Image (cartoon, coloured by chain):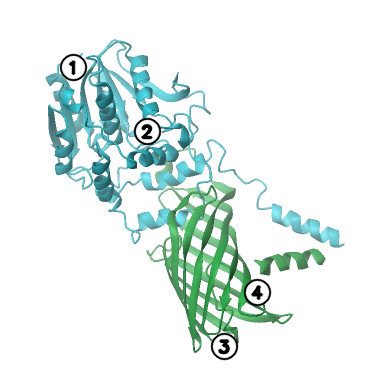
Chain colours: A cyan, B green
């Protein structure tokens, strides 16, 4: 009789588990990556599989799009596909460990790996050919890190459109993060929700870390001034790579040391509502390039590509014409 | 029956997260009402009630508490019910264990969630009539969490996100100190420490710190 009671007790305890979903299983909380879903467009490079696709004439002038984050993805940048209709070859890729690209543990990621990834993506889509970068936020920092390392890459980097880069040095990054994260208050619902949610689904693995990261990433920081009624879409926020690259950056970096040698014009695009990437800060960053121009789109924040695509493309096309990068 | 006794012993052998009392001043009243505020998985306000019982000449504190984020959100709450008991020590030095069952809810940008969990803790320290100080180690386990994803999450992130009960959804480890002073029928108690996730990384709110006021009668 005692044994039966024990079995009933054990059975009762197991009921909540039977049929439970597993937070770690791919495709439950966050989308499957290219490592888990072979139907996604992908390229195999540098010992990993990147989620990537290209649009437009394969022989057209190449534009390589670098997404933000770090750790986010190119979904909210897809409006730039419109440039493919102009005759450009527009290349999108989710960076290592980000978006729908294959996941990697943090200790396998460093800046050298990231720069080599970018170099190999260039050689995959534009072998021996020139190109122009369009980078957003972290992507604009990433493009600058590449230019600082490789210059104009033997004359092949013809220009860059840098959309509100956060910083080119660790000192600038600290000031930028102060404005970005300082706009989040523990007495506001957004941050408090993120704290509170940790009790329900804590980041024991990549999937849950990405899921928790999405909670803050969806709405962004208040100082970025996203339109709450038109939030930019994303596939997956790569929380591990985000934390890793931020940790590396805080150790110290200076991506301005060789920028003075970059021979081509760079366009900085900013939204006037963004209180983290301010006009003053963008002017400071632009001053590292010998030939840079800043254009401001009014009445929009950090998500100008998503929220104000037409205005963004107007400035982008004018710049591309000016530097002679036309189909 | 023996099994049930063992399970019951485990329940009382391990201090619940929020309910903190001065085990050196339990004679001052059998009923304890608590008001708490501070940082504890968010900026929170809490209230609780506990009753001190005597089992085999050992005090056992049975109680419950309700914690709400200070940011008004009707969907966010945490309810706990549990027990505290002195495991070792009849004098001023005591090892106290606690266990609590937890039900909590939240509604945020990505999902509405309900969680059933447990909280176990060990507290060791010196308990006197007028003050106490102790170290605590605890584990708050999200045993199973029901997730219902928001339309915004489906539209902006993942259309095919699966709703349902997720088993073993996570947990938070905490390590810290607690201490307080007792006067008349009241205690003022401070707790502070670090919070880690189950992977050993600092939690999004990596520290906790609360101030509680107890009244006994």
Q: CA distance from mark 4 to mark 3?
A: 17 Å
State how far apart marks 2 and 1 are (Cα): 26 Å
Q: Is residue A210 left or right of residue B4?
A: left
Q: Earlier in the sequence, mark 4 or mark 3?
A: 3
Q: Element under label 2?
A: loop
Query: Which residue carries the number 2 mark?
Result: A73
Instruction: Relative to A210, say whether B197 is above or below.
Output: below
Q: Nearer the viewer, mark 4 or mark 3?
A: 4
Separation of marks 3 and 1 at Cα, in angstroms: 83 Å
In this view, the mark in front (3 or 2):
3
Q: Quick check: do tags 3 and 1 share a chain?
A: no
Which residue bears the numbered disc 1? A325
Residue B89 left/right relative to A246: right
Q: Chain of mark 2?
A: A
Could you tell me which residue is drawn at 61 percent across and 75 percent down?
Answer: B93
For label 4, the SS is: strand
Rounded to the nearest whole Å, what is the CA distance between mark 3 and mark 2?
Answer: 60 Å
Residue A236 drawn above or below residue B216: above
Q: Which residue is mark 3?
A: B28
- For the question of whether residue A224 can be seen, the reply is no
Mark 4 on the same chain as mark 2: no
User: Badge 1: how crowded within 10 Å, few (<14), some, or many (20+)?
Assistant: some
Give the label, 3 or 1, closer to the camera.
Answer: 3
> Do dots 1 and 4 share one subunit?
no
């Amino acid at each position: 009789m005692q044994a039966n009671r024990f079995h009933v007790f054990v059975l009762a305890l197991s009921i909540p588990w039977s049929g439970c979903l597993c937070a770690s299983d791919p495709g439950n909380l966050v989308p499957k990556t290219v490592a888990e879903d072979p139907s996604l467009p992908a390229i195999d490079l540098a010992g990993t599989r990147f989620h990537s696709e290209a649009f437009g004439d394969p022989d057209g002038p190449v534009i390589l799009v670098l997404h933000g984050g770090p750790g986010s993805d190119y979904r909210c940048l897809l409006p730039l596909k419109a440039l493919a209709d102009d005759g450009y070859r527009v290349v999108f890729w989710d960076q290592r460990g980000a978006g729908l690209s294959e996941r990697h543990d943090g200790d396998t990621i460093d800046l050298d790996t990231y720069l080599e990834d970018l170099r190999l993506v260039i050689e995959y889509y534009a072998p021996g050919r020139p190109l122009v970068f369009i980078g957003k936020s972290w992507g604009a920092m990433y493009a600058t890190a590449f230019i600082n390392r490789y210059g104009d890459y033997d004359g092949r980097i013809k220009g860059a459109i840098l959309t509100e880069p956060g910083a080119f040095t660790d000192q600038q990054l600290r000031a930028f993060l102060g404005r970005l994260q300082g706009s989040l208050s523990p007495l506001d619902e957004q941050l408090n929700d993120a704290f509170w949610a940790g009790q329900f689904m804590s980041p024991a693995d990549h999937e849950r870390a990405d899921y928790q990261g999405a909670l803050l990433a969806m709405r962004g920081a208040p100082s970025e001034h996203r339109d709450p009624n038109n939030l930019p879409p994303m596939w997956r926020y790569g929380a591990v790579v985000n934390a890793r690259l931020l940790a590396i950056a805080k150790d110290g970096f200076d991506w301005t040391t060789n920028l003075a040698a970059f021979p081509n014009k760079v366009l900085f695009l900013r939204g006037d509502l963004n209180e983290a990437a301010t006009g003053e800060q963008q002017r400071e960053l632009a001053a590292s390039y010998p030939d840079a121009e800043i254009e401001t789109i009014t009445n929009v924040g950090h998500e100008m590509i998503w929220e104000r695509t037409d205005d963004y493309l107007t400035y982008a096309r004018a710049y591309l014409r000016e530097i002679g990068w036309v189909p | 029956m023996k099994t049930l006794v063992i399970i019951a012993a485990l329940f009382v052998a391990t201090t619940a997260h929020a309910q903190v009392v001065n085990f050196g001043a339990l004679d001052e009243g059998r009923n304890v009402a608590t008001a708490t505020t501070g940082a504890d998985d968010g900026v929170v306000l809490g209230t609780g009630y506990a009753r001190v019982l005597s089992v085999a000449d050992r005090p056992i504190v049975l109680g419950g508490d309700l914690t709400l984020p200070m940011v008004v959100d009707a969907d966010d709450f945490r309810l706990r019910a549990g027990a505290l008991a002195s495991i070792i020590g009849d004098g001023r030095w005591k090892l106290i264990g606690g266990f609590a069952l937890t039900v909590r809810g939240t509604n945020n940008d990505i999902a509405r969630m309900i969680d059933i969990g447990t909280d176990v803790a060990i507290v060791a320290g010196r308990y006197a009539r007028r003050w106490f100080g102790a170290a605590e180690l605890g584990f708050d386990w999200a045993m199973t969490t029901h997730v219902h994803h928001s339309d915004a999450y489906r539209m902006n992130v993942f259309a095919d996100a699966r709703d349902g009960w997720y088993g073993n959804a996570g947990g938070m480890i905490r390590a810290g100190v607690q201490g307080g002073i007792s006067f008349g029928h009241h205690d003022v108690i401070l707790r502070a420490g670090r919070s880690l996730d189950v992977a050993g990384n600092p939690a999004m709110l990596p520290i906790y710190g609360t101030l509680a006021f107890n009244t006994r009668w």
